[in-house]
Image (tube, rainbow, N blue to C red):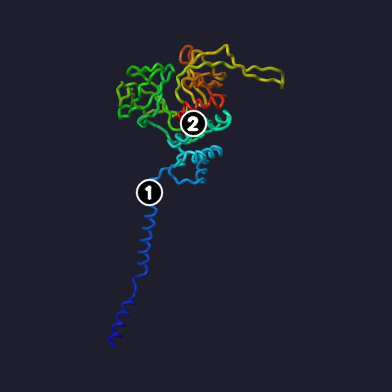
Amino acid sequence: MYLLQTTSRYAGQLFKKSADPVTSLIFVGVILFLFVLLIVGNSISQKKNQSPGSRKYNKRGFRKAAQTLGLSKKQILLLEDFIRTYHVTKPFALLSNTSVLNNTLGKAVRDADHLQGTNRQREARKLEIYRIKQRIERVAGKFGRISSTKDFRLNDKITFELESGLRYNSVVTANLKEFFCGQVPKDKHGDEVRWKKGTRIKVYLWGTGGAEFSFVSKTLGYNSIKGFSSILLSHSQKVTHSHQRKFRRKSLNRPCYFFPIKIIESGYGRKITKEAVVLKNQGHLGTILDVSAGGCSINSNSPLRRGELLKIEFETTRGNSVVAFGKVINMRLTGRRRGIMHIMFTKASGKNLNRINAYVYDFA
């Protein structure tokens, strides 16, 4: 009898009525919600800490991202070849304006000189490599806008332009609340170029993608910044953004010769033929202020008029001669006879374009 009573008592406990099912469902729902929230939060945190270039590589995703940038099939295949050849650990970093891209393309340009094939084929390969850089740089330039000189960073490359049209390269050495500093430029003899306090100077800065920014500043004085002789310049809130150039340009300030080109027609009616003749006996001396793969600007006492054609001979560096043909798209007088011609290249060999690109991008 005692055994039956005991069993009956425990049975009552075992089969006791359960808690409210609605409460149980709410409790389970809260647990599931917290679990999902934890997973989503962890995923977002990982994405924030992961740079675009560190994405896990897969060929399909890489090709799709490259096509979105506007790269051609040939250029994409070249990049895939570079990933294998140079063991690129962050392949997606090649699709943005990064040091990984510059270092990889630099190796590819140098190695192109040792590839089998004709000189023409090697130059064509180098030209395609530079076009990859130019395309990626243009896409990056759409997002790199500057509204104030206070946005300048250390070592940003800047150019000073005088009223005479002469330009001098420099870099930002400091950027403070009251003013910013640029390294004092030097002339072709290696001597420092200095201006009086209060001199108005036009300053250019090229952002990512070759985007050009310009503003007018005043010299405030000179000082030594981290061992560099520097010019102190006033800040400006009126930074002008000009149209984004197709090709990055770089100051040159080297002598050049240019020759007018005359178009001579011969024949009659439908048989008229046109021939471009270089007037070699009418050569002029000038100074190339800056250059890009798309054109240059020349300061001269004998500028040609807008629309005229010309042949240009110059050197990017000592011994690296360049010959190109172009058209004057604009001419601005800076004196009684002197003027600055803005020239668009109309014809240049791959070798000549590569010499210009090598100077402008300086992958070495």
Location of residue 248 in the rendering, given as x and y in whole percent from the top left corner: 47, 29
Quadrant (top left, top right, bottom left, bottom right) of the N terminus: bottom left
Pointer 2 local density, CA inside 10 Å: few below 14, some 14–19, many at least 20:
few
The residue indicated by pointer 2 is 110
Please tell me which of labels 2 and 1 falls first in the chain.
Answer: 1
Location of residue 163 in the rendering, given as x and y in whole percent from the top left corner: 42, 17
> Is 294 left, or right, of 10 in this rendering?
right
Q: Nearer the viewer, mark 2 or mark 1?
A: 2
Q: Compared to 33, does 78 lie above or below?
A: above
Mark 2 lies on a secondary structure that is helix
Q: Amino acid at mark 2?
A: Arg
Q: Residue at x 38, y 66 (%)?
A: 25
Q: Residue at x 53, y 18 (%)?
A: 313
Q: Compared to 6, does 330 lie above or below?
A: above
Location of residue 288 in the rendering, given as x and y in whole percent from the top left corner: 48, 19
> Is 29 left, or right, of 280 in this rendering?
left
Mark 1 lies on a secondary structure that is helix
Q: Nearer the viewer, residue 215 or 100?
A: 100
Q: Amino acid at mark 1?
A: Ser
The residue indicated by pointer 1 is 45
Q: Residue at x 50, y 41 (%)?
A: 84
Tag 2–tag 1 contact (CB < 8 Å)? no
